Amino acid sequence: MNLAAAKLGTLTGLGSGVRAGSAVTAPKLSATLAGLQGGLSTLAGLVSAANDVAGAQLTVKLAENDFTPARTLQDARTALSNAQRSQESALKSAQQTLASAHQAAQNAYELLQVAGSREAAAQNTYTQDAACLNSGTISAVDLQVTQLTLKKAQYTRLQAQNNGLEPLAALSVAAGQNLTGIGGTL
C-alpha cells in the first residue's frame, strides 16, 4: 500500500500523503491544450528561467555605464543571450511535453469510451441470451460463454478506466494543475 501511495504521489505530483479511495472514474478531459498552455508560465522551471533572464537583464543594465570595463559589459550581454536561449528552450520543451501529455490523455479517454461501448454491447448480448435460455433456444453453456464475454468486457473497461488516470496525472504535472480529480492542488 505504501509503495502504491508513493507511486500515486509521484504520478500526480501531490506527494506521498495522497491516498486513493475506491476506483476513480477518469474525468473527461475538458481543458483545451491552448487553455493549458496559458498556465505554463507558472511552472517552476519556466519561472526559474524567467528569473535568470531578469537577473541577466539587470546585470546588463548595471554594466551599461562609463565606469564598467567593456569586457564586463560584453560578458553580461553574453550571459543574457544564454539565459534567453535557455528560457526559450525550456518553454519549447514544456509546450512539447504538455502537447504530448494532452494527446495521451485524449487517447486514453477515447479508449475508455470504446471499452464502455463494448461492455454495453456485451451486456445487451448477455440479456438477450438469458432470454433465449429461458425460451429454450440456447443451452446454459452458450449463456456461460456470453457471460464470460461480458466479464472480459467489464475487465477491459476497468483497465481502460485505470489506464486513463495515468495520462491525466502526467498531463496534470505537465500543466502544473491537478486535472485528475484526486487529492489536492499541485
Image (spheres, rainbow, N blue to C red):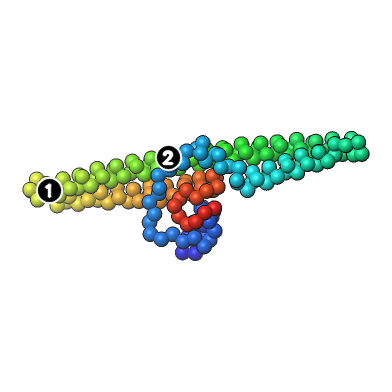
Is 41 displayed left or right of 72 in the figure?
Answer: left
Q: Which numbered disc covers residue 107?
A: 2
Question: Around disc 2, counting alpha carbons within 10 Å, would you say few (fewer than 14), some (14 to 19), or many (20 or more)?
Answer: some
How far across and how far down the image is residue 102, in percent? 49, 40
Q: Which numbered disc covers residue 185?
A: none
Real-space Cα separation, disc 1 to disc 2, in angstroms: 36 Å
Foreground pick, 142 / 48: 48
> Foreground mark, 1 or 2?
2
How far across and how far down the image is residue 157, in percent? 34, 48
Foreground pick, 152 / 73: 73
Residue 24 position (above or below residue 106) = below
Q: Amino acid at mark 2?
A: Asn
In the image, what residue occupies the spot 34% across and 42% down? Answer: 113
SS class, disc 1: helix
Is 120 displayed left or right of 174 in the figure?
Answer: left
Q: Amino acid at mark 1?
A: Ala
How far across and how far down the image is residue 85, in percent? 70, 36
> Residue under circle 1?
131
In the image, what residue occupies the spot 36% across and 44% down? Answer: 112
- Whether residue 71 is visible to the viewer of this picture, yes or no, is no
How far across and how far down the image is residue 143, in percent? 17, 50
Foreground pick, 153 / 48: 48
Contact between labelled residues 2 and 1, with CB atoms less than 8 Å apart: no
SS class, disc 2: helix
Q: Earlier in the sequence, mark 1 or mark 2?
A: 2
- Whether residue 87 is visible to the viewer of this picture, yes or no, is yes
Foreground pick, 165 / 51: 51
Residue that extends furthest to the bottom in the rendered view of this protein: 2
Is 100 displayed left or right of 137 in the figure?
Answer: right
Is 55 displayed left or right of 102 in the figure?
Answer: right
In the image, what residue occupies the spot 38% across and 59% down? Answer: 22
In the image, what residue occupies the spot 60% across and 46% down? Answer: 43
